[in-house]
Amino acid sequence: MKIKKLKHDTFRKIWLYRLKDRKVLVLRQALEEDASKIIQRLHRVLDEGLYLEEEKETVNSTEEEAMLIRQMREDGSMYTVAEIGDSIAGVAQIKRGQMEMNRHTGTFRIWLGPEFQGYGIGSKLMDYALQWAEHHGLEKVCLDVFADNERAIDMYRKYGFVVEGRRKEQFVLNGQRVDEVFMSKFI
């Protein structure tokens, strides 16, 4: 699925891309009414056992997710959805630091449904998020990733993220102990 840019607007509006199969990818700020679709997709992602620091029991309810979307918008953070047709393909978030001393930083999170991976959608979300960070005055974006998620680590490195640290054997995934890797990028 090759992606062709259709429209690149400001961060309060939408970014559109035409996929090779003629479907349209929409990147836009999440709305409270997206919460139900986001939670449904997240449950499917977790069913696949992919690389998320989350378990089904810890997933927000629809109401909690709607409140998170509203709160992130009010706090000056970013919550973006990748939408194809009427499906949420994935999300990207940057939570801005909440104190004056770390307001110049943000914590990045991204996930895509497995059926949407490998088509460049994650890269478009990364482009969007990093441009959003620069546009909104962030100086540093941080993230954490499982050490065995080499595909994600490679993508983050491609975008200029560097490893800042590691917590040894922080998680147990499928019976294996896995390190947590901390990465960051100065904008």
Image (cartoon, rainbow, N blue to C red):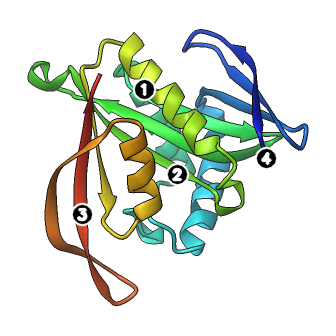
How far apart are the two marked residues, 1 and 2, measured between alpha carbons? 15 Å
Instruction: Report the front residue among 97 and 71.
Output: 97
In the rendered structure, find residue 1 and report the number of the disc placed on it.
Answer: 4
Is any part of residue 3 visible from this angle?
A: yes
Q: Earlier in the sequence, mark 1 or mark 4?
A: 4
Dot 2: few (<14), some (14–19), or many (≥20) neighbours within 10 Å?
many
Q: Which residue is mark 1?
A: 130
Residue at the image position 55 percent from the left and 35 percent from the top: 125
Occupied quadrant, residue 102: top left
- Quarter location, residue 44: bottom right
The answer to which of 109 and 151 lies nearer the viewer is 151
Q: From the viewer's perspective, tell me whether residue 105 is left or right of residue 37.
A: left
Sequence-first disc among 3 and 4: 4
Relative to 163, say whether 68 is above or below.
above
Q: What residue is shown at x 45% (from left), y 65% (from top)?
A: 51
> Regarding mark 3 in the picture, which secondary structure is present there?
strand
Disc number for residue 111? 2
Label whose residue precedes the other's in the sequence (1 or 2): 2
Cα–Cα gap, marks 1 and 4: 23 Å
- Circle 4 crowding by C-alpha within 10 Å: few under 14, some 14–19, many from 20: some
* Amino acid type for the residue under numbered disc 2: Trp
Give me the residue at 59% from left, 74% from top. 47
Q: CA distance from mark 3 to mark 4?
A: 31 Å
x and y percentages locating residue 178 in the rendered image: 27, 75
Could you tell me which residue is drawn at 58 percent across and 9 percent down?
10
Q: Amino acid at mark 1?
A: Leu
Local secondary structure at mark 2: strand
Circle 1 packing at 10 Å, graded few (<14), some (14-19), many (20+), is: some
Place of residue 172 in the rendered image (x, y in percent of width and height, measured from the top left): 29, 81
Query: Looking at numbered disc 4 in the image, what kind of residue is underneath it?
Result: Met
Of tags 3 and 4, the one toward the viewer is 4
The residue tagged 3 is 180
